[in-house]
Amino acid sequence: MQLHNLKDDSQKVSFVEAVKTGLGRNQGVFFPELLAPLADVDSLLDMDFVTRSSKILSHLIGDELPADTIALMVQNAFNFPVKLVAVEDNIYCLELFHGPTLAFKDFGGRFMAECLAQFSQGEKTTILTATSGDTGAAVAHAFYNKPNIDVVILYPKGKISLAQQKLFTTLGNNIHCYAVDGSFDDCQAMVKNAFLDSEVKSRLGLNSANSINISRLVAQVCYYFEAIAQLPKEQRAKAHISVPSGNFGNVCAAMIGAVIGLPVAKLSATTNQNDTVPRFMLDKNWAPNTTIESLSNAMDVSKPNNWPRVQTMLDNKWFSYDDFYSTSVDESDTRAVMKKIHQTGYVAEPHTAIAFHGLKANLATDFVGVFLATAHPAKFKESVEEILNIELEMPKPLADALAKPCLAEGIANDYDILREILLAKLG
């Protein structure tokens, strides 16, 4: 898999190098120079999830890893179900929260852990990542107690749900968590500064598990094929998928799938009030605003790192701008949509509700719609119970985590402070 840095085309790397490097020169993200189509997609859709995913990832990664190695990695990483649930006539919800941390990020986090276990060869590695909610838990659990790997997680203090926070701040050992006085974008900026710091990068063996890492992105392609595989065959060619979008890695994976042959006709990337991309789609002016806190906190991102990858595919006409929609949903509409979905008998947390809203806003009458449930409703217990006037049963992983003390340290939004901590503790 040949990739190049979207900010420095002279930097070309293999898949293995991209996974180990994380972020390219000038804070550029790596992306394939070419996305070749799959052969015989219909046969792939008849396979089980793990077998099909192994073949998709072998196709994307190429001959850098033996097919049997990739198959074992996928078997270890994707050991939980993906469920497509009918909600209304011709509208389905793709539930991606049946993994160990009850969020879609388990797919990418666990596959990345498998990759680094293959590639690191005992070298010291420090995973440094920022989280707006679910990445932290997925990465922490994927790498917990892995030999020669430390994980450092930055999150915006007081701006993620207690359940999200407790899933990763209670582990300890090789998982180090810091609550930053700032927004997710501030946390992400600190991560980027660390990657530009040659001393920190070399002494810590720095890597990132954000969706900027290509291993997470390719892993997420697989569940879109599973969504289409679970649809009735006569509906597949008219599928419209709606993805709740913050850092835009998830919808980027959907678009990669479409480019290599996934029979999805249209894509929606629906945001909350942090609407940089919806506004860009209107006037092609990139103008991020200050990040706004919302019910859908995992999407509180004004400067999405994965947008350059999406825009590359759109500008190269690998996927048509005409079939790509991006709209924003405010807080009042989020609440209203959660109630509307609940009337069907389905319980959706805020991110899922936003995906549903984006789908309904753009779904043509002769299309079938799929919207993503990216997290279990209990991860947003307080807001879901208050808005829907219900009482949620707490899944055991959350109940266990909530009973444990938070081990995170608070720090200021200051890279120099983080740098000092990292070098003293891990360098």
Image (tube, rainbow, N blue to C red):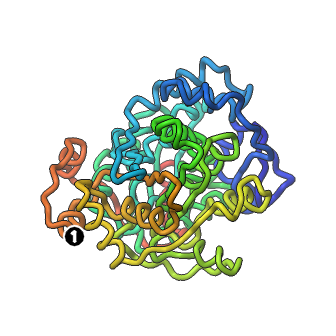
- Residue 67's place in the image compared with 88, above or below, is above
Q: Which of 111 and 383 is in front in this view?
A: 383
Crowd rating for badge 1 (residues with CA inside 10 Å; few <14, some 14–19, many 20+): some
Residue drawn 49% across and 74% down?
A: 328
Up-down relation of residue 399 to residue 245 (above or below): above
- Residue at position x 45%, y 70% in the image: 300
Compared across the picture, whether 163 is left or right of 213 comes to: left
Three-letter code for the amino acid on which mark 1 is drawn: Ile
Which residue does the image show at 49% across and 51% down from the upper left?
368
Identify the image quadrant of residue 140.
top left
Please say if 141 is above or below 356: above
Given the current orientation, which residue lies at the most extreme right position? 10
Q: Residue 66 in the image: state x and y as whole percent.
A: 67, 20
- Percent of width and height locating residue 110: 47, 37
* Residue marked by disc 1: 387
Percent coordinates x, y for residue 241 in the rendering: 52, 53
Query: Would residue 148 be visible to someone looking at this image?
Result: yes
Q: Viewed as shown, does residue 234 lie left or right of 214?
A: left
Occupied quadrant, residue 349:
bottom left
Is the N terminus in the top left, top right, bottom left or bottom right quadrant? top right
The reply to whether residue 175 is visible in this rendering is no
Counting from the top left corner in percent of width and height, residue 373 is at 38, 52
At 39% from the left and 76% from the top, the residue drawn is: 293
